[in-house]
Image (tube, helix red, strand yellow):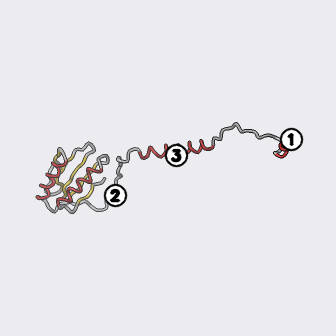
Amino acid sequence: MASSFSSSMRGGRGRKFKSEINVVPYIDVMLVLLIIFMVMPSANDPSVVDLPSAERSTKPPSDYVQVIIKPNGALSIGVKGKGEEAPETAPNRDALVKKLRTIHTDHPDYPVLIAGDKESKYDDVIQLISEAKKMGINRVGLSTK
C-alpha cells in the first residue's frame, strides 16, 4: 500500500529519460566558425597594399630629381627640367643614394619626387624618403597618376 501511495504522489508515472540530442550548442559553434572563416581571407596578406591614384593637389615643380621604384626592385634616378639627365638605373639602394647625393650637391634647390609603382614595396619608398631627409633634402614628394 505504501508503494502505491508514493507513486500517486509523484503523479502516477515514473520518470522517462529523453533520448534526444540537444543540437543547439553545436549550431552556435558552427555559426561562430563560419563567421571566423568568412573574415579570415580578407586578412591573409596584410603586406600587399594596392595604392589608389590621387588627384594632383598642386602642380609639380618644373625642375626636380625623379626616383623611380619598380615592383621588381629596379631603381632609377634622373633630373627632369632645365638640366635634364636621362634616368640611370641603379643596381641597389646604396648606389641610388650615392647618385642622389651627387645630384643634390649639383642641384641643392631641386626637390625629389619618388615614383613608386603600385606593386612596389611600401618599405622601399619609406626608406628612400628617409635617406633623402637625412641628406638635408627638405622637399620630398610622391608622384601619382
Q: Position of residue 81 (x, y in %)?
A: 17, 57
Mark 1: give few (<14), some (14-19) or many (20+) Cα within 10 Å: few
Q: Which residue, as the protein is rendered here, is positioned at the far right?
A: 1
Say which of marks 3 and 1 sits in front.
Answer: 1
Q: Position of residue 22 (x, y in %)?
A: 65, 41
Residue depth check, mark 1 versus mark 2: number of the one nearer the observer: 1
Location of residue 18 with respect to 110 vertically, above or below: above
Q: Earlier in the sequence, mark 3 or mark 1?
A: 1
Residue 95: image tag:
none
Rendering coords of residue 117 (x, y %):
29, 48
Residue type, label 1: Ser
Between 58 and 127, the one lying in front of the other is: 127
Q: Quadrant of residue 113?
A: bottom left
Circle 1: element type? helix
Q: Amino acid at mark 2?
A: Glu
Report the residue at 17% width, 59% height from top. 135
Q: Is residue 126 above or below residue 74?
A: below
Q: Which residue has dot 2 on it?
A: 55
Res 44 → quadrant: top left
Mark 3: secondary structure: helix
Which class describes the residues within 10 Å of circle 3: few (<14), some (14-19), or many (20+)? few
Given the image, on which type of amino acid does mark 3 rest?
Ile
Q: Earlier in the sequence, mark 3 or mark 2?
A: 3
Q: Check the image and name the residue furthest to the top.
A: 19
Which residue corresponds to mark 3?
A: 35
Question: Mark 2 and mark 3 in contact (Cβ < 8 Å)?
Answer: no
The label shown at residue 4 is: 1
Q: Secondary structure at mark 2?
A: loop
